[in-house]
Image (cartoon, coloured by chain):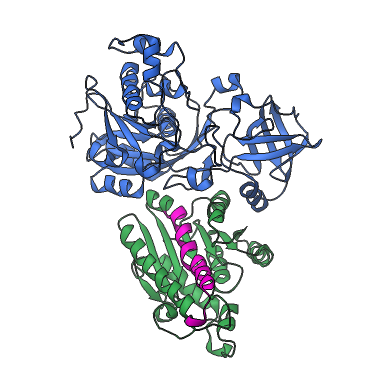
């Protein structure tokens, strides 16, 4: 998919990988709707993109809230037009320091699933139909190696990401032939606020900058042949074709 | 809005317009044609089918049977406009409250619509008190945003909202709700008034003929060799609360037809397929685009404003069949459907719907009008 001129929506766009993705998509000429819970930091990111000549819009909203979903999708399409690229990047670890599953409150597991699994499902349900009826679109689920590896203390997050991976595969199977591509991407360990919350003593020098991962994910969006629908891609193993 | 009962003249008109005499006296006919107005879950919607053989009796199907009712080579066209939260609270500088009902898309910070007096959706639109009089140049508040009145003609207004687009859209969705229907007790949420393929928020009210079109049915159509394509048409209001204004509905409405859909129409025509519109807004857009091209049945790519009015005398150039909600004689929508089937046949379809307890609500059951003489549909 050619990014230029496309409408894009990125959740969790006020910092980290979401911010880097929104900035890169805007730099490539997409019209980008940035979604995050807090309007303040989001406004700064949008102002930065606009300052560099990009087309960016701020939408304050919480994807874990069902009543917010049509507001987010409606505002986004009112501001940037049809959404051809949707990136489900927002996610939560649940309470930190991370806890063993047997120490995890039931409500905390539910809250993690609402944000990491049910929220993206609802937003896809509202955005993907317009893509499929028009025959083009890319949906990206930001995953984690915790979706595959049974890391102790990552139970709530890991289970939510494993479920999201499978949601991504089933969506891809159901949308086969419509022109909509559905991907899950494991971004790897990045130097972000979220990573610091999960593993406070990690050496930032060993972590990837989010912009580097964002460049790989944007390359996957562009390259349908190398990133076919239904795939679960590991960003660290992806070398963008130039 | 769905009339609870018929206007007295309607059966007479149905007889005049039709080729088959209408049996029974008008009062009995009216009772026979009354539809209830309950919401029907979108997976449970039923369909009254008006067959290509106009002498055949209408019959009932499930909406989900649509792929079987059409033929390989046909084209189904939907309106992918999402429904706006078009009912907005406002007040004058003097603190008098009103409802602004958007009549079309938001256009670069400008809101167009009609004003209604105070009250909520439990009061029928036509029974609401008149709105406060506002004049050009006046400052008002809409959706908690300051705005200036650019134009005011009776209830019709155009406002310029102060503030950037991000703030305006946030305010619309924070304060607005979809236009509500008086005969429904609970407030409708945006989730209830979107089609399964809704995109840009252009519609003042839901393009409701597409509500029962699930993805299972869309994909079933494609598997059956029926093409499905989309356009965007800014479906307007069904009611303004003012009789004189209501008589002029629908107003000019913006539409946009992507190149892919134009090709799909031309390809269907070339192979002898039928073009089936999901809803009258699709008819309006396609027919307007055909007239814009001016050479017969081909249609123009891109944006336009549909001004044409469809009625029993209208000869469609592009659209050959139609899915619509159920409308009783006397409603403007019934008149429009008469462009596709004789009024007596439509009245027979409504009588069948009434006898089987189908709903005439916007969120109710549906009818499929197949073009005459194009060969019978396959039987179950």
Give residue B39's position: percent from left, percent from top. 44, 37
Going 42% across and 27% down the picture, which residue do you hit? B291
Picture quadrant where residue A65 is located: bottom right
The location of residue B86, given as percent across then percent down, is: 59, 40
Quadrant of the frame with the C terminus of chain A:
bottom left
Chain A colour?
A: green
* Residue B217, placed above or below residue A93: above
Residue A105 position, x and y percent, is 53, 75
* Residue B44 covered by magenta stretch: no
**Quadrant of the drawing holding the N terminus of chain A:** bottom left
Region rendered in magenta: A102-128
Magenta region's main secondary structure? helix
Q: Quadrant of residue B242?
A: top right
User: Does any portion of residue B313 appear in the rendered image?
Assistant: no
Asked if residue A230 is positioned above or below residue B189 in the image, the reply reads below
Please give the name of the residue rendered at 42% of the width and 65% of the height, measured from the top-left corner: A222
In front: B14, or A144? Answer: B14
Residue A70 vertical placement versus B65 (above, below):
below
Q: Residue at x 68, y 66 (%)?
A: A44
Give left or right: position of A63 versus B363: right
Magenta segment: does it hold A113? yes
Which chain: blue? B
Would you say residue B152 is visible in this rendering? yes
Which is nearer the eye, B358 or B198?
A: B358
């Amino acid at each position: 998919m050619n990014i230029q001129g496309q409408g894009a929506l990125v959740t969790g766009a006020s910092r980290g990988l979401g911010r880097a993705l929104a900035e890169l998509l805007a730099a490539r000429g997409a019209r980008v709707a940035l979604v995050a819970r807090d309007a303040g930091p989001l406004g700064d990111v949008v102002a930065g993109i606009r300052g560099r000549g990009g087309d960016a819009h701020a939408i304050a909203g919480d994807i874990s809230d069902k009543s917010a979903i049509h507001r987010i999708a409606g505002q986004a399409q009112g501001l940037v037009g049809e959404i051809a690229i949707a990136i489900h990047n927002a996610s939560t670890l649940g309470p930190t320091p991370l806890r063993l599953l047997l120490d995890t409150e039931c409500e905390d597991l539910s809250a993690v699933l609402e944000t990491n699994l049910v929220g993206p499902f609802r937003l896809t349900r509202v955005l993907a139909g317009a893509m499929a009826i028009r025959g083009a679109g890319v949906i990206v689920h930001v995953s984690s190696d915790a979706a595959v590896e049974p890391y102790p203390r990552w139970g709530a997050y890991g289970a939510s990401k494993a479920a999201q991976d499978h949601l991504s595969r089933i969506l891809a199977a159901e949308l086969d032939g419509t022109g909509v591509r559905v991907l899950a991407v494991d971004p790897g360990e990045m130097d972000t606020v979220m990573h610091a919350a999960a593993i406070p003593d990690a050496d930032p020098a060993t972590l990837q900058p989010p912009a580097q991962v964002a460049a790989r994910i944007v390359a996957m969006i562009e390259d349908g042949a190398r990133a076919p629908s239904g795939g679960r891609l590991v960003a660290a193993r992806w070398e963008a074709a130039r | 809005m769905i009339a609870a009962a018929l206007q007295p003249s309607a059966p007479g008109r149905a007889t005049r317009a039709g080729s088959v005499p209408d049996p029974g006296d008008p009062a009995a006919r009216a009772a026979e044609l009354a539809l209830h107005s309950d919401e029907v879950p979108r997976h449970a919607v039923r369909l009254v089918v008006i067959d290509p053989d106009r002498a055949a009796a209408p019959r009932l199907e499930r909406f989900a049977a649509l792929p079987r009712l059409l033929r390989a080579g046909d084209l189904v066209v939907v309106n992918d406009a999402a429904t706006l939260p078009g009912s907005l609270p406002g007040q004058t500088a003097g603190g008098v409250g009103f409802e602004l009902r958007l009549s079309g898309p938001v256009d670069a910070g400008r809101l167009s619509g009609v004003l209604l007096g105070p009250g909520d959706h439990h009061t029928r639109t036509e029974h609401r008190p008149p709105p406060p009089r506002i004049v050009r140049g006046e400052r008002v508040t809409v959706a908690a945003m300051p705005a200036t009145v650019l134009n005011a003609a009776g209830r019709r207004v155009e406002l310029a909202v102060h503030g950037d687009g991000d703030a305006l859209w946030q305010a619309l969705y924070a304060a607005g709700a979809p236009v509500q229907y008086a005969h429904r007790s609970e407030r409708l949420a945006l989730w209830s008034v979107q089609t399964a393929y809704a995109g840009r928020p252009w519609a003042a009210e839901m393009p409701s003929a597409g509500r029962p079109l699930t993805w299972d049915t869309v994909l079933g159509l494609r598997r059956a060799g029926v093409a499905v394509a989309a356009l965007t048409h800014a479906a307007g209001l069904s009611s303004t609360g003012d009789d004189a204004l209501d008589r002029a509905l629908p107003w000019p409405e913006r539409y946009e037809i992507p190149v892919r859909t134009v090709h799909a129409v031309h390809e269907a025509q070339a192979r002898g397929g039928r073009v089936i519109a999901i809803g009258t807004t699709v008819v309006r857009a396609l027919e307007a685009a055909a007239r814009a091209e001016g050479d017969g049945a081909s249609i123009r790519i891109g944006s336009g404003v549909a001004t044409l009015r469809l009625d029993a005398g209208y000869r469609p150039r592009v659209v050959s069949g139609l899915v619509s909600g159920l409308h009783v004689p006397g409603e403007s929508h019934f008149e429009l459907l008469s462009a596709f089937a004789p009024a007596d046949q439509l009245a027979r379809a409504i009588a069948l719907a009434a006898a089987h307890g189908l709903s005439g609500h916007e969120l109710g059951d549906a009818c499929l009008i197949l073009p005459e003489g194009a060969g019978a549909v396959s039987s179950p």
